[in-house]
Amino acid sequence: MVGNPSSLHTAGRLVRQVVEEARESIAADLGTRPSAVIFTSGGTESDNLAVKGLFWQREPRVETPPRVLASSIEHHAVLDPVEWLAAHEGAQVEWLGVDALGRVSLAQIKESLRGGDVALCTVMWANNEVGTVEPVRAIAALCREAGVPFHTDAVQSLGQIPVNVAEVGAHAVTVSSHKIGGPFGVGALILDPALTLTPIMHGGGQERDIRSGTFDAPAIAAFAVAVHHAVTHQPAHAAHVRELRDQLVLAVLDAVPGSILNGPVSSATAGDDVRLPGNAHFSFPGCEGDALLMLLDAAGIDCSTGSACTAGIPEPSHVLLAMGVDEPTARASLRFSLGRSTTEDDVEAVVRALPVAVERAARAGLMTARARR
Protein backbone atom coordinates (compact mmCIF):
# COMPACT_ATOMS: atom_id res chain seq x y z
CA MET A 1 0.00 0.00 0.00
CA VAL A 2 1.80 3.11 -1.22
CA GLY A 3 -1.00 5.65 -1.73
CA ASN A 4 -2.26 8.15 0.81
CA PRO A 5 -5.90 7.22 1.55
CA SER A 6 -6.84 10.94 1.52
CA SER A 7 -5.38 11.52 -1.97
CA LEU A 8 -7.54 11.64 -5.07
CA HIS A 9 -5.19 9.80 -7.42
CA THR A 10 -5.68 6.13 -8.25
CA ALA A 11 -3.19 4.78 -5.71
CA GLY A 12 -4.82 6.86 -2.98
CA ARG A 13 -8.33 5.76 -3.92
CA LEU A 14 -7.32 2.10 -3.86
CA VAL A 15 -5.92 2.43 -0.34
CA ARG A 16 -8.97 4.41 0.77
CA GLN A 17 -11.11 1.53 -0.43
CA VAL A 18 -9.18 -0.77 1.92
CA VAL A 19 -9.84 1.62 4.82
CA GLU A 20 -13.55 1.92 4.08
CA GLU A 21 -14.00 -1.82 3.64
CA ALA A 22 -12.32 -2.32 7.02
CA ARG A 23 -14.65 0.29 8.53
CA GLU A 24 -17.70 -1.52 7.14
CA SER A 25 -16.43 -4.87 8.39
CA ILE A 26 -15.82 -3.59 11.92
CA ALA A 27 -19.22 -1.87 11.99
CA ALA A 28 -20.99 -5.06 10.94
CA ASP A 29 -19.15 -7.13 13.54
CA LEU A 30 -19.84 -4.66 16.37
CA GLY A 31 -23.47 -3.93 15.52
CA THR A 32 -23.14 -0.32 14.46
CA ARG A 33 -23.01 1.89 11.36
CA PRO A 34 -19.80 2.49 9.42
CA SER A 35 -20.12 6.23 10.03
CA ALA A 36 -19.82 5.53 13.77
CA VAL A 37 -16.32 4.03 13.48
CA ILE A 38 -13.59 6.61 14.14
CA PHE A 39 -10.11 5.14 13.69
CA THR A 40 -7.46 6.10 16.28
CA SER A 41 -4.03 4.96 17.41
CA GLY A 42 -5.52 2.71 20.11
CA GLY A 43 -7.43 2.57 23.37
CA THR A 44 -5.65 5.42 25.11
CA GLU A 45 -6.32 7.90 22.33
CA SER A 46 -9.92 6.73 21.98
CA ASP A 47 -10.53 7.18 25.71
CA ASN A 48 -8.96 10.65 25.69
CA LEU A 49 -10.94 11.62 22.61
CA ALA A 50 -14.20 10.49 24.20
CA VAL A 51 -13.65 11.96 27.66
CA LYS A 52 -12.19 15.32 26.63
CA GLY A 53 -14.17 15.63 23.41
CA LEU A 54 -17.54 15.01 25.06
CA PHE A 55 -16.68 17.33 27.94
CA TRP A 56 -15.67 20.18 25.64
CA GLN A 57 -18.73 19.63 23.45
CA ARG A 58 -21.16 20.08 26.33
CA GLU A 59 -23.67 22.90 26.37
CA PRO A 60 -22.06 25.73 28.37
CA ARG A 61 -23.72 26.47 31.70
CA VAL A 62 -22.16 29.39 33.50
CA GLU A 63 -24.12 29.00 36.71
CA THR A 64 -22.84 25.53 37.64
CA PRO A 65 -19.46 23.87 37.03
CA PRO A 66 -19.86 20.85 34.72
CA ARG A 67 -19.69 17.45 36.39
CA VAL A 68 -18.05 14.27 35.14
CA LEU A 69 -19.17 10.89 36.47
CA ALA A 70 -16.48 8.22 36.34
CA SER A 71 -16.07 4.90 38.08
CA SER A 72 -13.24 4.72 40.60
CA ILE A 73 -11.80 1.59 38.95
CA GLU A 74 -11.21 2.95 35.44
CA HIS A 75 -8.03 2.27 33.49
CA HIS A 76 -5.58 5.18 33.66
CA ALA A 77 -6.43 5.96 30.03
CA VAL A 78 -9.72 7.26 31.46
CA LEU A 79 -8.68 8.20 35.01
CA ASP A 80 -5.91 10.53 33.92
CA PRO A 81 -7.94 12.52 31.33
CA VAL A 82 -10.73 12.93 33.90
CA GLU A 83 -8.26 14.20 36.49
CA TRP A 84 -6.73 16.50 33.85
CA LEU A 85 -10.16 18.00 33.15
CA ALA A 86 -10.59 18.63 36.85
CA ALA A 87 -7.18 20.28 37.14
CA HIS A 88 -7.26 22.36 33.94
CA GLU A 89 -10.88 22.75 32.79
CA GLY A 90 -12.82 23.18 36.01
CA ALA A 91 -14.61 19.84 35.83
CA GLN A 92 -16.24 18.68 39.04
CA VAL A 93 -15.51 14.97 39.20
CA GLU A 94 -17.78 12.55 41.00
CA TRP A 95 -16.06 9.21 41.41
CA LEU A 96 -18.55 6.37 41.35
CA GLY A 97 -17.79 3.87 44.08
CA VAL A 98 -17.84 0.10 43.70
CA ASP A 99 -18.70 -2.77 46.01
CA ALA A 100 -16.36 -5.51 47.20
CA LEU A 101 -16.71 -7.28 43.84
CA GLY A 102 -15.91 -4.18 41.80
CA ARG A 103 -19.48 -3.42 40.66
CA VAL A 104 -20.75 0.14 40.34
CA SER A 105 -24.04 1.16 41.90
CA LEU A 106 -26.90 1.89 39.49
CA ALA A 107 -28.69 3.71 42.29
CA GLN A 108 -25.73 6.08 42.75
CA ILE A 109 -25.52 6.72 39.02
CA LYS A 110 -29.23 7.45 38.81
CA GLU A 111 -28.99 9.88 41.70
CA SER A 112 -25.85 11.52 40.30
CA LEU A 113 -27.44 12.12 36.91
CA ARG A 114 -29.99 14.48 38.44
CA GLY A 115 -29.40 18.20 38.23
CA GLY A 116 -28.70 18.67 34.55
CA ASP A 117 -25.07 19.66 34.96
CA VAL A 118 -23.41 16.35 34.00
CA ALA A 119 -21.19 16.65 30.94
CA LEU A 120 -20.60 12.92 30.57
CA CYS A 121 -20.55 9.58 32.37
CA THR A 122 -17.80 7.02 31.78
CA VAL A 123 -17.80 3.47 33.17
CA MET A 124 -15.67 0.70 31.71
CA TRP A 125 -17.44 -2.33 30.22
CA ALA A 126 -15.19 -4.75 32.12
CA ASN A 127 -12.34 -4.09 34.53
CA ASN A 128 -8.84 -4.84 33.33
CA GLU A 129 -7.56 -6.05 36.71
CA VAL A 130 -10.23 -8.10 38.47
CA GLY A 131 -12.39 -8.80 35.40
CA THR A 132 -15.70 -7.49 36.77
CA VAL A 133 -18.28 -6.93 34.03
CA GLU A 134 -20.30 -3.78 34.67
CA PRO A 135 -24.05 -3.31 33.91
CA VAL A 136 -23.33 -1.06 30.94
CA ARG A 137 -26.70 -1.56 29.26
CA ALA A 138 -28.51 -0.32 32.34
CA ILE A 139 -26.08 2.59 32.72
CA ALA A 140 -26.54 3.56 29.08
CA ALA A 141 -30.32 3.55 29.53
CA LEU A 142 -30.10 5.81 32.58
CA CYS A 143 -27.80 8.22 30.75
CA ARG A 144 -29.97 8.38 27.65
CA GLU A 145 -33.01 9.07 29.81
CA ALA A 146 -31.10 11.92 31.46
CA GLY A 147 -29.73 13.23 28.16
CA VAL A 148 -26.12 12.63 29.25
CA PRO A 149 -23.50 11.12 26.91
CA PHE A 150 -22.23 7.74 28.12
CA HIS A 151 -18.78 6.39 27.26
CA THR A 152 -17.55 2.90 28.01
CA ASP A 153 -14.09 1.43 27.55
CA ALA A 154 -14.59 -2.00 25.94
CA VAL A 155 -10.91 -2.75 25.34
CA GLN A 156 -10.98 -5.72 27.73
CA SER A 157 -14.43 -6.92 26.67
CA LEU A 158 -14.03 -7.36 22.92
CA GLY A 159 -13.42 -11.01 22.10
CA GLN A 160 -14.11 -12.08 25.69
CA ILE A 161 -17.84 -11.38 25.98
CA PRO A 162 -20.46 -10.33 23.41
CA VAL A 163 -19.98 -6.70 22.34
CA ASN A 164 -22.84 -5.19 20.36
CA VAL A 165 -22.87 -1.40 20.32
CA ALA A 166 -26.50 -1.06 19.25
CA GLU A 167 -27.70 -3.40 21.98
CA VAL A 168 -25.75 -1.72 24.78
CA GLY A 169 -26.87 1.76 23.75
CA ALA A 170 -23.69 3.65 24.73
CA HIS A 171 -22.92 6.92 22.97
CA ALA A 172 -19.20 6.16 22.70
CA VAL A 173 -17.32 2.84 22.93
CA THR A 174 -13.54 2.35 22.96
CA VAL A 175 -11.98 -0.70 21.31
CA SER A 176 -8.37 -1.59 20.60
CA SER A 177 -6.58 -3.91 18.19
CA HIS A 178 -3.74 -5.46 20.13
CA LYS A 179 -6.00 -6.93 22.83
CA ILE A 180 -7.60 -9.19 20.21
CA GLY A 181 -4.45 -10.27 18.42
CA GLY A 182 -4.27 -7.43 15.91
CA PRO A 183 -1.40 -4.98 15.41
CA PHE A 184 -0.33 -2.49 18.05
CA GLY A 185 -1.02 1.21 17.52
CA VAL A 186 -4.52 1.09 16.07
CA GLY A 187 -8.01 1.14 17.56
CA ALA A 188 -11.32 2.91 17.24
CA LEU A 189 -13.85 5.05 19.03
CA ILE A 190 -17.35 3.94 18.12
CA LEU A 191 -19.26 7.22 18.30
CA ASP A 192 -23.00 7.71 17.89
CA PRO A 193 -23.28 9.49 14.50
CA ALA A 194 -25.85 11.82 16.04
CA LEU A 195 -23.12 13.22 18.30
CA THR A 196 -20.05 15.22 17.54
CA LEU A 197 -16.90 15.78 19.54
CA THR A 198 -14.46 18.59 20.03
CA PRO A 199 -11.28 17.08 18.54
CA ILE A 200 -8.11 16.79 20.57
CA MET A 201 -5.98 16.86 17.39
CA HIS A 202 -6.39 19.22 14.45
CA GLY A 203 -5.04 18.86 10.96
CA GLY A 204 -6.39 17.36 7.76
CA GLY A 205 -9.96 16.90 8.96
CA GLN A 206 -10.11 13.13 8.54
CA GLU A 207 -12.75 11.07 10.34
CA ARG A 208 -15.60 13.60 10.20
CA ASP A 209 -13.17 16.30 11.42
CA ILE A 210 -13.03 14.42 14.73
CA ARG A 211 -9.62 12.75 14.40
CA SER A 212 -7.17 14.23 11.94
CA GLY A 213 -4.18 12.25 10.70
CA THR A 214 -3.13 10.02 7.83
CA PHE A 215 -4.77 6.60 7.99
CA ASP A 216 -2.53 3.65 8.81
CA ALA A 217 -4.25 1.56 6.17
CA PRO A 218 -2.33 -1.72 6.66
CA ALA A 219 -2.92 -1.64 10.42
CA ILE A 220 -6.59 -0.74 9.95
CA ALA A 221 -7.07 -3.64 7.54
CA ALA A 222 -5.44 -6.05 9.99
CA PHE A 223 -7.53 -4.58 12.82
CA ALA A 224 -10.70 -5.41 10.90
CA VAL A 225 -9.56 -9.01 10.42
CA ALA A 226 -8.79 -9.30 14.13
CA VAL A 227 -12.21 -7.89 15.10
CA HIS A 228 -14.00 -10.32 12.79
CA HIS A 229 -12.05 -13.27 14.16
CA ALA A 230 -12.60 -12.17 17.77
CA VAL A 231 -16.35 -11.71 17.35
CA THR A 232 -16.84 -14.89 15.31
CA HIS A 233 -14.94 -17.10 17.72
CA GLN A 234 -15.95 -15.35 20.94
CA PRO A 235 -18.39 -18.01 22.25
CA ALA A 236 -15.95 -20.89 21.72
CA HIS A 237 -13.01 -18.86 23.05
CA ALA A 238 -14.94 -17.81 26.16
CA ALA A 239 -15.97 -21.39 26.90
CA HIS A 240 -12.37 -22.58 26.47
CA VAL A 241 -10.68 -20.02 28.72
CA ARG A 242 -13.48 -20.03 31.29
CA GLU A 243 -13.06 -23.76 31.85
CA LEU A 244 -9.29 -23.37 32.23
CA ARG A 245 -9.75 -20.32 34.46
CA ASP A 246 -12.05 -22.24 36.78
CA GLN A 247 -9.50 -25.06 37.00
CA LEU A 248 -6.82 -22.51 37.86
CA VAL A 249 -8.93 -20.81 40.52
CA LEU A 250 -9.82 -24.04 42.32
CA ALA A 251 -6.26 -25.32 42.13
CA VAL A 252 -4.67 -22.11 43.41
CA LEU A 253 -7.09 -21.75 46.33
CA ASP A 254 -6.35 -25.37 47.25
CA ALA A 255 -2.56 -25.23 46.74
CA VAL A 256 -1.95 -21.89 48.48
CA PRO A 257 -3.73 -21.68 51.86
CA GLY A 258 -4.88 -18.17 52.65
CA SER A 259 -4.98 -17.05 49.01
CA ILE A 260 -7.91 -14.82 48.06
CA LEU A 261 -9.80 -14.65 44.77
CA ASN A 262 -10.64 -11.03 43.99
CA GLY A 263 -13.72 -10.05 42.01
CA PRO A 264 -16.94 -11.91 41.28
CA VAL A 265 -17.21 -15.69 40.97
CA SER A 266 -18.10 -17.01 37.52
CA SER A 267 -18.18 -20.63 36.45
CA ALA A 268 -18.27 -22.61 33.23
CA THR A 269 -21.38 -24.49 34.39
CA ALA A 270 -23.30 -21.35 35.28
CA GLY A 271 -22.21 -19.53 32.14
CA ASP A 272 -22.21 -16.24 34.03
CA ASP A 273 -21.12 -13.03 32.37
CA VAL A 274 -20.28 -11.23 35.63
CA ARG A 275 -16.55 -11.73 35.10
CA LEU A 276 -14.31 -11.88 32.05
CA PRO A 277 -13.82 -15.57 31.26
CA GLY A 278 -10.03 -15.33 30.90
CA ASN A 279 -9.37 -13.42 34.12
CA ALA A 280 -8.16 -14.75 37.49
CA HIS A 281 -6.98 -12.28 40.13
CA PHE A 282 -5.60 -13.34 43.50
CA SER A 283 -4.14 -11.82 46.64
CA PHE A 284 -1.47 -13.68 48.61
CA PRO A 285 -1.28 -11.96 52.02
CA GLY A 286 2.21 -11.64 53.40
CA CYS A 287 3.84 -11.39 49.98
CA GLU A 288 4.79 -8.52 47.70
CA GLY A 289 3.20 -8.82 44.29
CA ASP A 290 6.35 -7.60 42.53
CA ALA A 291 8.43 -10.30 44.22
CA LEU A 292 5.93 -12.97 43.23
CA LEU A 293 5.90 -11.69 39.66
CA MET A 294 9.68 -11.96 39.35
CA LEU A 295 9.80 -15.42 40.92
CA LEU A 296 7.13 -16.68 38.55
CA ASP A 297 8.81 -14.95 35.62
CA ALA A 298 11.98 -16.91 36.42
CA ALA A 299 9.84 -20.05 36.20
CA GLY A 300 8.64 -19.07 32.73
CA ILE A 301 5.22 -17.80 33.80
CA ASP A 302 3.94 -14.39 32.69
CA CYS A 303 1.54 -12.58 35.00
CA SER A 304 0.84 -9.04 36.17
CA THR A 305 0.61 -7.19 39.46
CA GLY A 306 -1.81 -4.66 38.00
CA SER A 307 -0.11 -1.97 40.05
CA ALA A 308 1.58 1.22 38.91
CA CYS A 309 4.99 2.49 39.99
CA THR A 310 5.75 6.11 40.74
CA ALA A 311 9.39 7.12 41.17
CA GLY A 312 10.28 3.48 41.76
CA ILE A 313 7.90 3.12 44.72
CA PRO A 314 5.32 0.32 44.25
CA GLU A 315 1.78 1.58 44.77
CA PRO A 316 -1.19 -0.63 45.61
CA SER A 317 -3.81 -1.11 42.91
CA HIS A 318 -6.39 1.70 42.90
CA VAL A 319 -8.93 -0.89 41.78
CA LEU A 320 -8.45 -3.09 44.83
CA LEU A 321 -8.40 -0.09 47.17
CA ALA A 322 -11.71 1.08 45.69
CA MET A 323 -13.09 -2.40 46.39
CA GLY A 324 -12.20 -2.00 50.07
CA VAL A 325 -9.05 -4.14 50.09
CA ASP A 326 -6.40 -2.96 52.58
CA GLU A 327 -3.08 -1.71 51.21
CA PRO A 328 -0.87 -4.67 52.27
CA THR A 329 -3.27 -7.15 50.69
CA ALA A 330 -3.62 -4.99 47.57
CA ARG A 331 0.15 -5.01 47.17
CA ALA A 332 0.16 -8.81 47.49
CA SER A 333 -1.87 -9.39 44.34
CA LEU A 334 -1.40 -10.96 40.92
CA ARG A 335 -3.50 -11.18 37.78
CA PHE A 336 -3.40 -14.23 35.52
CA SER A 337 -4.79 -13.78 32.02
CA LEU A 338 -5.72 -16.84 29.96
CA GLY A 339 -5.73 -16.57 26.18
CA ARG A 340 -6.13 -18.55 22.99
CA SER A 341 -2.82 -20.34 23.40
CA THR A 342 -3.38 -21.29 27.06
CA THR A 343 -3.54 -25.02 27.74
CA GLU A 344 -4.13 -27.31 30.71
CA ASP A 345 -0.36 -27.82 30.85
CA ASP A 346 0.03 -24.07 31.38
CA VAL A 347 -2.46 -24.13 34.25
CA GLU A 348 -0.63 -27.05 35.83
CA ALA A 349 2.69 -25.21 35.47
CA VAL A 350 1.31 -22.23 37.37
CA VAL A 351 -0.06 -24.42 40.14
CA ARG A 352 3.30 -26.21 40.48
CA ALA A 353 5.34 -23.00 40.61
CA LEU A 354 3.05 -20.80 42.68
CA PRO A 355 3.27 -22.40 46.15
CA VAL A 356 7.08 -22.29 46.06
CA ALA A 357 7.04 -18.68 44.85
CA VAL A 358 4.58 -17.65 47.56
CA GLU A 359 6.67 -19.34 50.26
CA ARG A 360 9.86 -17.62 49.07
CA ALA A 361 8.16 -14.23 48.70
CA ALA A 362 6.59 -14.49 52.15
CA ARG A 363 9.93 -15.43 53.69
CA ALA A 364 11.64 -12.51 51.97
CA GLY A 365 8.90 -10.16 53.11
CA LEU A 366 9.23 -11.33 56.69
CA MET A 367 13.00 -10.80 56.61
CA THR A 368 12.52 -7.31 55.17
CA ALA A 369 9.99 -6.45 57.86
CA ARG A 370 12.39 -7.60 60.60
CA ALA A 371 15.23 -5.59 59.10
CA ARG A 372 13.12 -2.42 59.23
CA ARG A 373 12.43 -2.75 62.94
Image (tube, helix red, strand yellow):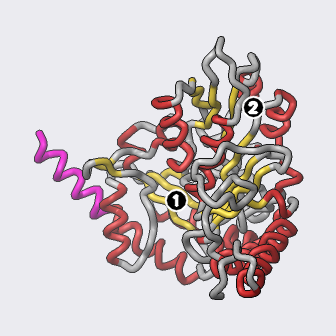
Instruction: Tell me residue 353's x, y (percent).
Output: 40, 74
| Residue at x 61% of width, y 64% of height | 213
Q: Is residue 76 left or right of residue 227?
A: left
Secondary structure at badge 2 equals helix
User: As rendered, which of 182 and 358 lies closer to the eye?
Assistant: 182
| Residue at x 68% of width, y 80% of height | 222
Which segment is the magenta one?
A: 359-373
Q: Which disc is residue 170 wearing?
A: none
As drawn, which residue projects farthest toward the top?
Answer: 63
Q: Is residue 267 magenta?
A: no
Instruction: Tell me residue 98's x, y (percent).
Output: 61, 35
Question: Is 11 located above or below residue 175 in the figure?
Answer: below
Question: Is 227 located above or below residue 291 in the figure?
Answer: below
Q: Amino acid at mark 2?
A: Leu
Secondary structure at badge 1 equals helix
Residue count near mark 2 (Cα–Cα under 10 Å), binned few <14, some 14–19, many ≥20: some
Asked if residue 181 shows in the view, the reply is no
| Residue at x 60% of width, y 57% of height | 203
Q: Which residue is mark 2?
A: 106
Q: Which residue is mark 1?
A: 253
